[in-house]
Image (spheres, coloured by chain):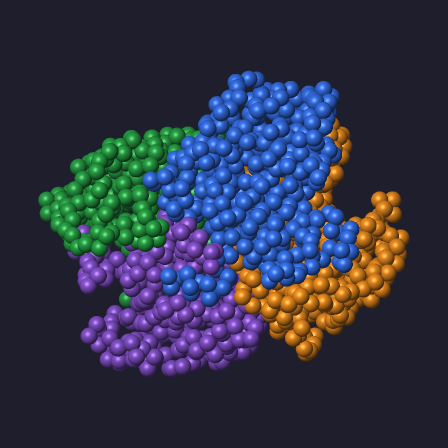
Chain colours: A purple, B green, C blue, D orange
Amino acid sequence: MRMSGSTFGSIFKITTWGESHGKAIGVVIDGCPAGLPLCEEDIQKYLDRRKPGQSKFTTKRSESDKVQILSGLFDGKTTGTPISLMVMNEDQRSRDYGNIAETYRPGHADYTFDQKYGFRDYRGGGRSSGRETIARVAAGAVACKLLSYLGITVTAYTKSIGGIEISPQNFDLSARDSNPFYMPDAKAAVDVEALVSECMEQKDSVGGVVECVVKNIPAGVGDPCFEKLDANLAKALMSVGAVKAVEIGDGVAAAASRGSQNNDSMYYENGILTKKSNHGGGIYGGISDGSDIILRAHIKPTPSIAADQNTVTRSGENVTLSIHGRHDPVIVPRAVVVLESMTALTVLDALLASMTSRLDKIAAFFQR
Amino acid sequence: MRMSGSTFGSIFKITTWGESHGKAIGVVIDGCPAGLPLCEEDIQKYLDRRKPGQSKFTTKRSESDKVQILSGLFDGKTTGTPISLMVMNEDQRSRDYGNIAETYRPGHADYTFDQKYGFRDYRGGGRSSGRETIARVAAGAVACKLLSYLGITVTAYTKSIGGIEISPQNFDLSARDSNPFYMPDAKAAVDVEALVSECMEQKDSVGGVVECVVKNIPAGVGDPCFEKLDANLAKALMSVGAVKAVEIGDGVAAAASRGSQNNDSMYYENGILTKKSNHGGGIYGGISDGSDIILRAHIKPTPSIAADQNTVTRSGENVTLSIHGRHDPVIVPRAVVVLESMTALTVLDALLASMTSRLDKIAAFFQR
Amino acid sequence: MRMSGSTFGSIFKITTWGESHGKAIGVVIDGCPAGLPLCEEDIQKYLDRRKPGQSKFTTKRSESDKVQILSGLFDGKTTGTPISLMVMNEDQRSRDYGNIAETYRPGHADYTFDQKYGFRDYRGGGRSSGRETIARVAAGAVACKLLSYLGITVTAYTKSIGGIEISPQNFDLSARDSNPFYMPDAKAAVDVEALVSECMEQKDSVGGVVECVVKNIPAGVGDPCFEKLDANLAKALMSVGAVKAVEIGDGVAAAASRGSQNNDSMYYENGILTKKSNHGGGIYGGISDGSDIILRAHIKPTPSIAADQNTVTRSGENVTLSIHGRHDPVIVPRAVVVLESMTALTVLDALLASMTSRLDKIAAFFQR
Amino acid sequence: MRMSGSTFGSIFKITTWGESHGKAIGVVIDGCPAGLPLCEEDIQKYLDRRKPGQSKFTTKRSESDKVQILSGLFDGKTTGTPISLMVMNEDQRSRDYGNIAETYRPGHADYTFDQKYGFRDYRGGGRSSGRETIARVAAGAVACKLLSYLGITVTAYTKSIGGIEISPQNFDLSARDSNPFYMPDAKAAVDVEALVSECMEQKDSVGGVVECVVKNIPAGVGDPCFEKLDANLAKALMSVGAVKAVEIGDGVAAAASRGSQNNDSMYYENGILTKKSNHGGGIYGGISDGSDIILRAHIKPTPSIAADQNTVTRSGENVTLSIHGRHDPVIVPRAVVVLESMTALTVLDALLASMTSRLDKIAAFFQR
């Protein structure tokens, strides 16, 4: 279903709302099972990972991004009814938008919003602002907590920025949250810092790649032919602003490979089924096989740059634009928790859907 | 919505059914507008592009894949009620499946289907067979015909196989249907032929990349935040078996680029709005801008290979498997029309959805 | 979700197709759990209950209505993939429709179809024909079989025709299938026979009421606020042609009652929770309480009557119309199995949905 | 689609949240077309019609029910992005719920919520409280405003309470808002006042009937076979707490009628198509014919009564319960605006969906 684009998921279903300079941003989670212990701090720690102003490499916009839970809890647990989460917008800095209001910023959604809706809220991008992802992260935090009760973890990190990639031998997940780029490789992060600093001096921006790993998902999750797990993950990641490509498992490399190399051989070792490789990224025929799910999102450079750019106005003029103000030179680090959240939401929804695939298990469920 | 995975789309909605060795394969199109002239030949010409046995590089399975229209037409036009399309399975060759029934083929969905459903139809892969795509193509043909009435075209072709890529200076779309690889570059196709022949001798298989271009789509199609046009295209392509990565516009390359390079500058020339580049692939903020939409799917090598492979049986043994029979050494050429179909279905559905985005246009619609 | 109106249900989802004088009528069931033993006879016995020509009180149209299962089965059991069911139309009697084509029959959907779609398939009503219900019954038979595995039964019968009602003291369900009116009261059926015969002589038609009872449904089925079980049952029944009112429990009578009378008191008897009455019809706050669900559909008289009627043509003339041919003087008896089917489909879908409402039960499900 | 029950509609889609004694109650409207002038007062006047404490016949709970618009507006018009509406709960009177927490009130959803979710928010009924309808009315107000731009009106009123019915000859819509029962018949309202006063003295409650009329809807709205306009209206009304029956047009009376009486004859008068009667209530084959749509909801007596009732506790005891506090002796008057809202939401969603039914109209839409 594709209608009314602010809803994601079918069983664990989220509906997000809010624009950059409106009163608040929020999400309603409908279909969260009853009985999950939940408090604001569970959500806040995820929001803090995407909060602006944490390093000199992110926007200076000052927002505390404090979440409030408005409904759906009783005695500290979810009741099974909708959970409404809200974050107030605090720094809606009053200024003259006359210029932005009339000019279409290159690489942004200004022109397309105007074409679609006839006009747009030009203050800070309105609904096309990156602040929209607050709602995704708030909901993702709840999904992650629920998944953790079932033993499933979802972990994302920056794989590369501007072509500088983490090295497999330096991989250290504990290092991820200790550098401004959320890279699990402290050495690579130092190199990236130099690169991004140079970019900022050049009034330019840079892109990168985020990788996400899901562990301990049961086999059997995903619904052929159109609700395959990889298809929904691709949609989930591509729905995040600035993502331009999605890979599952070996992804692009698989297409250049041979069958004899790319097939993942299975074998039993001490009675336990395992695989020699995981080129497929844990999904075959759109269904999880119980091994790690591995996916990557490729993120374009921030379109807002201070360098001069040619563009047009609404009224038909060619103009030169230089975008100053509060922009990230690289959006990748703050996207990490967003992509982690979207992956968690997708996996959880598919997992719940998988409960109805077999009559024997349904019969057992209702007999208890 | 992700339930019951055999439905795709919301307004122009298709529901597919059928397995490799069942009686037939089909699709019900619900929501096709009334008044579209349609006949079986309109659909057959698309099906013929994916039909097996057209060259020595495709499976020898003998199927005429003739489509029947069972409902939804009157006086040669669609009535607005469901269109039921069916293709009989003819070559359900009777043979001993004992081996396949018990063995999990590497790179296939055998293990995951068994885990999900408790057992599976092992004859030719059952529902996970590539024959499932017949239904996608039959529906896609109807979508393409409808889009053509609105002036919109969708065109896919093979961009590369086994690393051999079409060259921009040799690009000739008219050459696409004249070589067994559906490449719009006759010279590249010759090189690919040698490569694939070598692969077959080595009992191996190879992958490749399909590119798809949508022309003349109006600006304003796609619904933020979760039903963005690129998000749904990513899902559509990734839902096709063997696709492991999807790119929009510059895709993977965008992530290694700078903002100053990657931004698409707009300008007016003789009063007409145009762009200096199309790195974004025609979609900004999830909404079409009216320029060409460009996307690519990366397809893994066919998992069924004649070379010996290590794998396991259902009952817990480690075994060696060599898959003989009717398999394509490269699935890419036959996937071209499938990906074209999925793109058309996605674009059409989003286009119809875009009709309700503005009150002024709605009011005008009902005033006539 | 309301798009593309030929799909019903979300987990156990059916998509129907076919018109009165097309080649065939069918349904695709998507989301039927794997492992249900199923054969054509299971479905045929339901279809035979709605088949025409079983008494002098039904249309003379000659149709065997034999169902074919085209997909979704292996070794006699459902595989979890789509089940495609088809019934060929046999008696598409060739005749001159010129009159019907141009004239809008009173009480029919001729005018509204023309207004909606711009033209219509006027042969036998096209998609608005009662034959459309074949698909509902075929799918309903599968739902009933699945429910019976879980101990749940769904039973409908004629409660009244033309004001002649079954008497509580004569109620005998075993009598239902022994009279042409499907009334569980042999004496009432005799009175109805006289009434309907008189109606036919007067070239008129008559309506009636069907009641449906669901037994052994677990407590906890139905999802507030909009997917309440009674709300979906109301939609399911009202979606059947000619139904003009739906009641749950005491229904209309409840509105004329007092709280002290209408409330259903609960009490424990020998440790078992029970109720003194069931005015609510087994649903409170949109959720089942485990007692019998009771609902009724009120069906209008067949609009096709042989008596002269004033009406109009497409081209703007006032005319007199007398409808001869193959019409039921009362549609109620053949609607019984249709309403039973729609109830079963609704209950099954809600039941499957209820599996994800509690974290403790979800955790237990995945631990096994 | 039936998942996650707090969403209603597909194009103009609403998601509601909040419980009786939580912080707030709200709704997110997703899919509202851009360009609709909207302010809080537009919504407030609808909310004021259901606000408690307006007469001695409603609960004494003191709530101002002031709505806030949190997103989706710019320069006083809707932007096409989600509209978030919120009403704070003010009178969450602190008291001892020990008794209610453990006791299942007859006729309420206490037992079913406990069965479904494992526990429940027992403060004021939690999510099953009538306060949930605030969100429906807030969204309905927006739907009504949009419909009025298209010339369509939706009007509901009390038809009867406790068997006392408005008289056709006294019908005066302007009288509706001048009596506490929202009856368009001042004389009947006086009789009802006496009846309800007597009821209150007897510590009892009473039910009634609400009628709703939709005027100026275009012909062609509604989608056979499952998204018929009457089917969705039935669902919409039945989803409101305490509604036990729904009628379209003549409804129950149609089932006792003859075809010759019940058919609505059409004729042309001075070139304008009209009907001699409207027994069908403006819907044929599930599609509007352009005449008035007429429907009725039958509402049970308030289950909360001060008289002693037998019931049970959670822990297995039989007890006697007398419910004191802030309860309406008749819920019908406050349900009027709720049912008007649900009708408007349903009609608007179906209207928007009808825009894609004809290729000629689609082509014209995109040519402009």
Classify D41 as above or below B270: below
Q: In this view, does A165 lie to the left or right of A118?
A: left
**Rendering quarter of residue D129:** bottom right
Report the residue that reaches farthest toward the top. Answer: C95
**Whether residue D189 can be seen here:** yes
Up the image or down, A281 lies above or below D254; here it is below
Residue that appears at 47% across and 42% down? C145
Judging depth in this view, the residue of C289 and B321 nearest the camera is C289
Nearer to the camera, A100 or B254 = B254
Give coordinates of residue B198: x percent, y percent.
Answer: 11, 46
As drawn, the residue found furthest toward the front would be C270
Above or below — where is C59 with respect to A135?
A: above
Number of numbered discs on residues = 0
| Residue at point 37%, 69% (across, down) | A151
Q: Where is residue A197 in the image (x, y as percent from the top left)?
A: 31, 79
Where residue B145 sits: x, y (%)?
41, 37
Q: Can residue B167 be seen in this view?
A: no
Q: Which of A82 and C211 is in front in this view?
A: C211
Residue C344 appears left or right of C319: left
Q: Position of residue C35 (x, y in %)?
A: 38, 46
Residue under the image location 52 percent in, 37 percent down: C137
- Of residues A123 and B206, the one drawn nearer to the viewer in this rendering: B206
Quarter of the image where the C terminus of chain C is located = bottom left
Identity of the residue drawn at 66% across and 22% down: C323
Describe residue A157's horizontal placement relative to residue C99 as left or right. left
